[in-house]
Image (cartoon, rainbow, N blue to C red):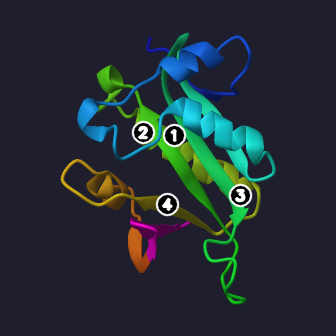
Amino acid sequence: MPSPIRLVPVTSDNVEAACALTVRPDQSGLVKPVAWSLAQAYTTPETAWPRLIADGETLVGFVMAFLDVRFNPGKPDDPLRSGLWRLNIAAAEQGRGYGRFAVGAVNDELRRRGSTRTTVSYVPGVYGPEEFYRKLGFRPTGELSGDQVVAELELA
């Protein structure tokens, strides 16, 4: 019987293992390291929802959601958004469904909090995650967040 995949909080017992998670070398310029994400989570606890992805007792990745953020705070009509902030799947664990599981778990948490859509932004390019997000149903909005494409998924 396969081990259950689940999200677990980052704790003092697993933070070192969390920071040791690394993506493939060709992806390293596309997503910040876990340690960077944890620093952002620490400084924005009202916004960040960081979790580790575990398969049994093995940590296989990291996911972090953002909650109720304005991408363009200077624009009065800019909506509050929630969505996927970071997704890091360990290089040796990619292609096994962990990313799909993590995005689904974030979507479930956002639904639980009353959200009707999930937003993600990503760096476009050959090694980027665009195809992964498209397969999950995300569609580009036509907006950019810095140099990243913004995409959304309606939550049913």
Q: Give SS at disc 4.
A: strand
As displayed, is residue 32 above or below residue 78? above
As displayed, is residue 58 above or below residue 89? above
Q: Amino acid at mark 2?
A: Gly
Q: Nearer the viewer, residue 34 or 100?
A: 34
Q: Where in the figure is residue 92, as x and y percent of width and height? A: 31, 20
Whether the residues at callouts 2 and 3 have beta carbons within 8 Å, the answer is no
Q: Give SS at disc 3.
A: strand
The alpha-carbon separation of the residues under discs 3 and 4 comes to 12 Å
Identify residue for label 4: 120
Q: Say which label, 3 or 4, has the lower sequence index.
A: 3
Of marks 2 and 3, the one in the foreground = 3
The magenta stretch is: 144-156
Q: Give the quarter of the image for residue 119.
A: bottom right
Q: Is residue 150 magenta?
A: yes
As displayed, is residue 21 above or below residue 101? above
The alpha-carbon separation of the residues under discs 3 and 1 comes to 16 Å
Whether the residues at callouts 1 and 2 have beta carbons within 8 Å, the answer is yes
Identify residue for label 1: 102
Q: Is residue 78 left or right of residue 147?
A: right
Q: Where in the figure is residue 116, as x and y percent of width and height? A: 64, 69
Which residue is found at the position 30% from the left and 58% from the top? 130
